[in-house]
Structures are given as C-alpha cells and as structure tokens.
Image (cartoon, rainbow, N blue to C red):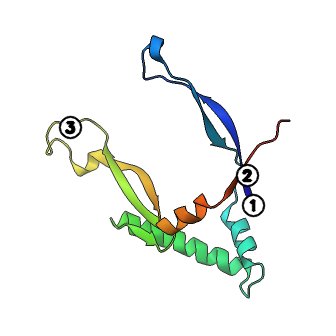
Amino acid sequence: MSIYYRMDGQTDNLNPEGSKKRGMFPRIIRKRTVALRELCKLAAEGTTFNAFELESAGELLLREIIDQLGDGNNVCLDEFGTFSLSAESIRPAQDEYDIRAESIRVKKVVFKTSKRLMSRMRSFAFKRKPKT
C-alpha cells in the first residue's frame, strides 16, 4: 500500500515582488472516493458480519454523531479522533451583545485526529507518480 504524490510549484503571494520565494511542495494524488456502502463491503470481508449490517450500524452512528454535535457536544471516536463544531456570526460585532443567537451559524465541523491515527498515517509509504 503506497500513497502517490507529485511535486507542485508553490506561489508566494505574501512577500513583495522583489523578494518572492518559490518552492515545491508534495501534493497527494487521490485515486477515488470510497463511499460508506463500499467501505462496509470491504470491512465485512472475512468476518461474520454482512455488509448490510455494517452499513446500517454506520448510518446509525453517523446520525448519532450529528445529533450529539447538534446538542453542543464533542464526539470522540477512541483511537480515531474527535469531532467538534466551530461557529461564526453572519455580521461583524463590536460588542458581545451586538449579536443574537439568530445571527450565529455553524462555520464548520472540525475533526482532530487521535495520536494513534496520526502515528499510523505517518508510517505509510509514499511513491512519486511515474511520468506518463
């Protein structure tokens, strides 16, 4: 199992024209997106579970994660990571009482990986994509 990458040029938009810095950075080449149904089929191979049971359990788990986030909780999936929400106001405020609850919305769902997951990710091998 290897992760393919290519090197891309990096543009410096922060420094003035005469002192711009150029460089290269690795960009991961994604092969495809694996959906929940296929993930469950793959996970069920070699077990006594069938893919439908795993998919149903996965959908229940996702629904519960959403409900818990909607109730203001963080959700920690041990050895995987923690989901939490961040908020933003839809207009600027100068004082804490300038904004009411109706003017606040979810900005994004934040996912912070666990140390174990990051350790596993760092052990993966990388290969440069062959020239075509």
Label 2 vs 1, first from the N-terminus: 1
The residue that mark 3 highlights is: 93
Q: Quadrant of residue 70?
A: bottom left
Which residue occupies 66% across, 78% down?
Answer: 54
Given residues 75 and 9, the one toward you in this image is: 9
Mark 3 nearby-residue class (10 Å; few <14, some 14–19, many ≥20): few
The residue that mark 2 highlights is: 32
Disc 3 vs disc 1: which is toward the camera?
Answer: 1
Mark 1 nearby-residue class (10 Å; few <14, some 14–19, many ≥20): few
Going by the numbered disc 3, the residue's amino acid type is: Ala
From the viewer's perspective, is residue 33 above or below residue 37? above
Please give left or right for residue 68 compared with residue 123 in the image: left
Quadrant position of the C terminus in the picture: top right
**Residue 8 image position (x, y, % from top left):** 65, 32
From the viewer's perspective, is residue 126 above or below residue 117? above
Which residue occupies 43% across, 23% down?
Answer: 14
Mark 2 nearby-residue class (10 Å; few <14, some 14–19, many ≥20): few
Given residues 109 and 56, the one toward you in this image is: 109
Given residues 30 and 5, the one toward you in this image is: 5
Disc 2 vs disc 3: which is toward the camera?
Answer: 2
The residue that mark 1 highlights is: 1
**Residue 74 image position (x, y, % from top left):** 37, 66
Q: Are marks 2 and 3 in contact (CB under 8 Å)?
A: no
Secondary structure found at label 2: loop
Label 3 vs 1, first from the N-terminus: 1
Secondary structure found at label 1: loop
